[in-house]
Image (cartoon, helix red, strand yellow):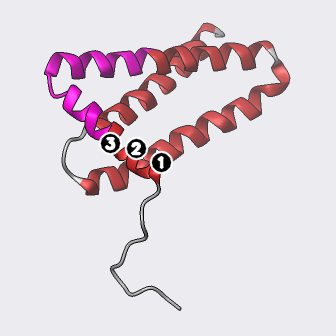
Amino acid sequence: MASPPGSRYQQTGFQERVAQARAALESWAANPWRRLALLLIVLLISFSIGGAVGSITGTLAKLDPVGALICVAAIELAIRARGPLIRRGGDALVLQLLDMARIGLLYGLLLDGFKLL
């Protein structure tokens, strides 16, 4: 039997904990300095990951296409995840964190690519 339109399924315990963690992070990052520090940490971590991916795939020359595919897929998924986050409204912390991770990964890959020139 089909469920009536507009009804939602019951949330699992994992979904509830993710929602609680998001709310706790957003309330913790209400302070602008904490928010800026968190965004900077995510940017630097993703920059390091981008540099590491570029270095590892550059060393193992056979994995260049696979590494490029993984990075393009990750960036494309991050771009597609922006739509629901923008429509959700409210605090944009998760959207900002996603954007910082995407920018850091791309910048790390580009910088590592320019090292090879």
Depth order, front residue of 16/36: 16
Q: Which of the 4 image quadrants contains residue 9?
A: bottom left
Report the Cα–Cα distance between label 3 and label 1.
Answer: 10 Å
Do labels 3 and 2 touch, CB within 8 Å? yes
Dominant secondary structure, magenta: helix
Q: Which residue lies furthest to the right in this view?
A: 62
SS class, disc 2: helix
Residue appearing at x 65%, y 20% in the figure? 53
The one nearer the camera, 12 or 52, is: 12
Residues in magenta?
22-44
- Which residue is disc 1 drawn over? 14
* Image coordinates for residue 101, horizontal then vertical, percent: 43, 28
Q: Please indicate whether residue 110 sits to the left or right of residue 23 in the image.
A: right
Query: Which label sits on residue 99?
Result: none
Residue 17: numbered disc: 2
Q: Image check: 91 left or right of 79?
A: left
Q: Decide whether residue 37 is among the magenta residues.
A: yes
Residue 44 drawn at (x, y percent): 43, 14
Label 3 sits on a secondary structure element that is: helix
Residue extending farthest to the front is: 13
Instruction: Check disc 1 and give the amino acid type.
Output: Phe
The residue carrying mark 3 is 20
Q: Which residue, as the protein is rendered here, is positioned at the far top? A: 115
In-image side of 39 versus 27 (left or right) = right
Sequence-earlier tag: 3 or 1: 1
**Rendered position, 56 above or below 18:** above
